Image (tube, rainbow, N blue to C red):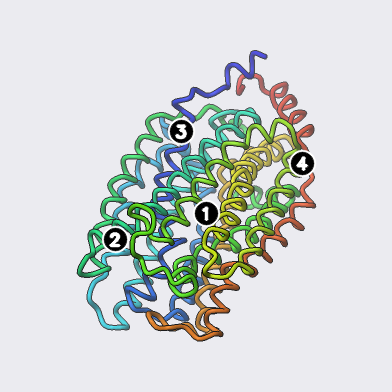
């Protein structure tokens, strides 16, 4: 079909787009996996104070997402609506990511204030670059099938970043921080900052925007928001995003605590240069990438909605099963977790491709294309989920009596285990329930594509 051949993306463009999420994850996954540990065990802030900081700053950050989407939708430059922000924000984003781990020698109050300021600014800069980056996928091609492939490349890049973080952070921190762990984090994050700038600029250089908004569209913010809340499929993905990212944030925040205090990883070499924690996270990241690579194969054979529900359910079961594995059964723990990661791998590209379908749906039904708002408002939901998960992780650690760098009580160990297994699994099951209400089938998406092509062939 001529329309399809014209809108199939080059391999270099797919790779270029995927590298943008690699750049994001040099910081995003570091925050998910190491930030709670860094603040409690390295920078010396209490877990309850960290939980409150996470909740408040992430809540404010979540509110920024729709605002950024509205701004991006109304941006007009020779580079397009979304690509310019990837160029402009790369250096400020990377610099603030480094400053978060600079670790100045302040007193208790000074450290807490410094953490609040740098973390809040970093999340605002993350919004400024990642909302346009996410929305870019919706305007690179009008084809749902092509967006699914593009989304797979994105999450190979994203989980590739996760792999690098899982594999490199602890060895690099130990290498650069032989005398002081804080020095190790500083140097490591400085290197990551430089790499992330290079990757973002590569994304800018290799991608293009092709789907333009009709010139006669209304630019009323009130009207855009009204359309959004009347878009049923988006409402479902909104709640699913909250539940999914709450689950991810809870488990990620206590991964280091789980291995340090429950598995009793002593950080000595286990396999080559890896300790048990690093090896576990590295294998899980590889398993996620393997799962992502199966996305097109599965999507060609199954309905997106059914596939997403089944995979989410399987991932939740695998996560809950980890609770029953004793700490000395490391290989069993690793195998179960990797199976869960393979199952979970395709869920991320599937759901992000569905956001693009929702943008098409809103344009077809309301004659208004709001790619930036659709993606950013969904990111608001995801960040609200991260807000809940990050806040709960700190508060529940405090509730269970966690004390940094000390032997844990039975209650605090149980809390760490629950935060790593059953509690994230419960939120994942709630996500399965929410997805059952998603109504935009693959057949309907194909019909909408055809209708939009007939409405305005020049845009395709």
**Circle 2 sits on which residue?**
173
Residue at mark 1 to residue at mark 2: CA–CA distance: 36 Å
Which image quadrant: the C terminus?
A: top right
The image's mark for residue 67 is 1
* Label at residue 329: none
Pick the quarter of the image with the N terminus.
top right
Instruction: Give how far apart the Cα atoms at labels 2 and 3 are.
Output: 39 Å
Query: Does 1 sit above or below residue 377?
Result: above
Q: Residue 436: x, y in percent?
A: 79, 52
Residue appearing at x 72%, y 61% in the figure:
429
Q: Residue at x 63, y 58 (%)?
A: 244
- Residue at image position (37%, 69%) is 266
- Residue 416 lies, with reference to residue 58, above or below; the image says below
Q: Earlier in the sequence, mark 1 or mark 4?
A: 1
Label 3 vs label 4, nearer the camera? 4
Q: For the residue labelled by badge 4, is the local secondary structure a helix, a strand or a loop?
A: loop
In the foreground, 328 or 236? 328
**Which mark is first along the chain, 3 or 2?**
3
Dot 2, how many residues are within 10 Å of its Cα: few (below 14), some (14-19), or many (20+)? many
Element marked by disc 3: loop
Query: Tag 4 or tag 3, which sits nearer the N-term?
Result: 3
Q: Residue at x 39, y 65 (%)?
A: 119
According to the image, label 4 marks what residue?
A: 440
Secondary structure category for the residue under label 1: helix
Nearer the viewer's eye, disc 1 or disc 4?
A: 4
Q: Position of residue 413 (x, y in %)?
A: 53, 79
């Amino acid at each position: 079909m001529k329309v399809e051949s014209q809108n199939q993306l080059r391999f270099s463009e797919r790779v270029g787009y995927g590298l943008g999420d690699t750049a994001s994850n040099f910081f995003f996954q570091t925050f998910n996996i190491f930030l709670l540990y860094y603040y409690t065990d390295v920078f010396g802030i209490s877990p309850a104070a960290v939980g409150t900081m996470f909740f408040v700053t992430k809540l404010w950050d979540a509110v920024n997402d729709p605002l950024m989407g509205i701004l991006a939708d109304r941006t007009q430059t020779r580079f397009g609506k979304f690509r310019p922000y990837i160029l402009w924000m790369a250096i400020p984003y990377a610099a603030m990511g480094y400053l978060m781990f600079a670790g100045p020698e302040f007193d208790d109050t000074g450290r807490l204030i410094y953490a609040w300021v740098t973390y809040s600014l970093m999340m605002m800069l993350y919004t400024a670059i990642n909302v346009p980056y996410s929305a870019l996928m919706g305007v690179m091609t009008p084809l749902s099938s092509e967006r699914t492939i593009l989304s797979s490349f994105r999450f190979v890049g994203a989980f590739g970043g996760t792999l690098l973080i899982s594999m490199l952070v602890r060895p690099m921190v130990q290498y650069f921080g032989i005398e002081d762990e804080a020095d190790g984090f500083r140097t490591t994050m400085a290197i990551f900052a430089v790499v992330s700038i290079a990757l973002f600029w590569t994304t800018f250089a290799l991608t293009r925007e092709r789907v333009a908004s009709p010139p006669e569209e209304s630019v009323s913010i009130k009207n855009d928001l009204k359309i959004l809340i009347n878009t049923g499929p988006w409402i479902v993905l909104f709640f699913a995003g909250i539940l999914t990212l709450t689950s991810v944030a809870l488990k990620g925040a206590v991964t280091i605590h789980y291995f340090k205090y429950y598995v009793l990883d002593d950080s000595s070499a286990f396999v080559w240069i890896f300790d048990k924690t690093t090896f576990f996270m590295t294998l899980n990241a590889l398993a996620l990438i393997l799962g992502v690579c199966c996305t097109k194969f599965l999507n060609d054979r199954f309905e997106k909605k059914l596939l997403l529900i089944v995979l989410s359910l399987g991932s939740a079961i695998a996560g809950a099963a980890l609770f029953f594995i004793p700490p000395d059964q490391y290989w069993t723990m690793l195998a179960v977790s990797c199976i869960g990661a393979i199952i979970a791998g395709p869920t991320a590209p599937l759901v992000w491709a569905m956001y693009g379908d929702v943008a098409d749906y809103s344009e077809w039904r309301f004659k208004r294309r709001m790619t930036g708002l659709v993606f950013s408002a969904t990111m608001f939901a995801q960040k609200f989920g991260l807000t809940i998960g990050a806040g709960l992780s700190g508060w529940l650690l405090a509730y269970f009596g966690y004390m940094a760098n000390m032997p844990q009580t039975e209650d605090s160990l149980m809390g760490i285990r629950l935060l790593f297994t059953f509690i994230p699994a419960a939120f994942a099951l709630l996500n399965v329930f929410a997805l059952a209400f998603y109504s935009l089938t693959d057949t309907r998406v194909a019909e909408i594509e055809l209708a939009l092509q007939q409405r305005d062939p020049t845009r395709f």
